[in-house]
Image: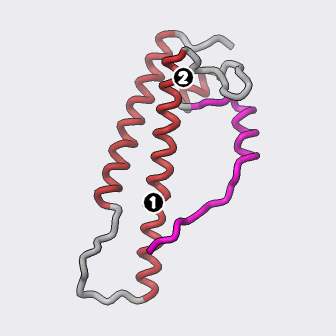
Amino acid sequence: MPKPSRQHLQQLREQLDRREAELLEEVRTKEDTGAPSKEPHDQVEDPAEQGEERIREAIVLAEQARDIDELRQIAAAKERMERGRYGECVDCGVDIPLARLQAQPAAARCIPCQQTYEQTRNKVVRIPRLA
């Protein structure tokens, strides 16, 4: 399968840039609004309300971690572009189909290698403990 053309690379780079900007804005917004207030308040919370607040905080932290991971993937894809290795599977070296790159511009692996990676990866979901 041929490597993406110069025009396709430019379009893919623009997609990566747009997604990066979106993610950076989301991370900034979550950092500004995601942390619970440490200010004392007049309303007494019962254990159920405290548990609900901890769940909300864990969700915000999980979303931030997901966004940061995607930002790392985008940075790695841009680095592969700079080195002329974009569009090659990082595991087996075959060319990643253009349709896959258009759907997932930060893709680092061909579909078979991605499936293997996902099957062998630790799938445990961890919710961070909150104070």
In the displayed structure, 60 sits above or below 93; it is: below
Q: Tell which of 2 and 35 is nearer to you.
A: 35
In the displayed structure, 44 sits above or below 66; it is: below
Q: Quadrant of the N terminus?
A: top right
Q: Tell which of 77 and 98 is nearer to you.
A: 77
Per the image, the residue denoted by label 1 is 61
Dot 2, crowdedness within 10 Å: few (<14), some or many (≥20)?
Answer: some
Image x and y of residue 97, in percent: 65, 21
Dot 1, crowdedness within 10 Å: few (<14), some or many (≥20)?
Answer: some
Would you say residue 111 sits in the magenta stretch?
A: yes
Magenta stretch, main secondary structure, is loop
Image x and y of residue 43, in percent: 27, 87
Point out the tag, 1 or 2, that comes first from the N-terminus.
Answer: 1
Q: Amino acid at mark 2?
A: Arg
Q: Residue at x 44, y 75 (%)?
A: 131
Tally of numbered discs: 2
Q: Amino acid at mark 1?
A: Leu
Q: Residue at x 51, y 19 (%)?
A: 81
Per the image, the residue denoted by label 2 is 80
Query: Considering the numbered disc 2 on the image, is that residue within a helix, a strand or a loop?
Result: helix
Q: CA distance from mark 1 to mark 2?
A: 29 Å
Apparent side of residue 46 relative to residue 86 in the rendered image (left or right) = left
Would you say residue 44 sits in the magenta stretch?
A: no
Query: Considering the numbered disc 1 on the image, is that residue within a helix, a strand or a loop?
Result: helix
Image x and y of residue 18, in percent: 38, 32
Q: Which residues are magenta?
A: 107-131
Q: Do the numbered discs 1 and 2 sit on residues whose CB atoms are within 8 Å?
A: no
Image x and y of residue 8, in percent: 50, 15
Q: Residue at x 60, y 24 (%)?
A: 99
Q: Residue at x 50, y 24 (%)?
A: 79
In the displayed structure, 122 sits above or below 90; it is: below
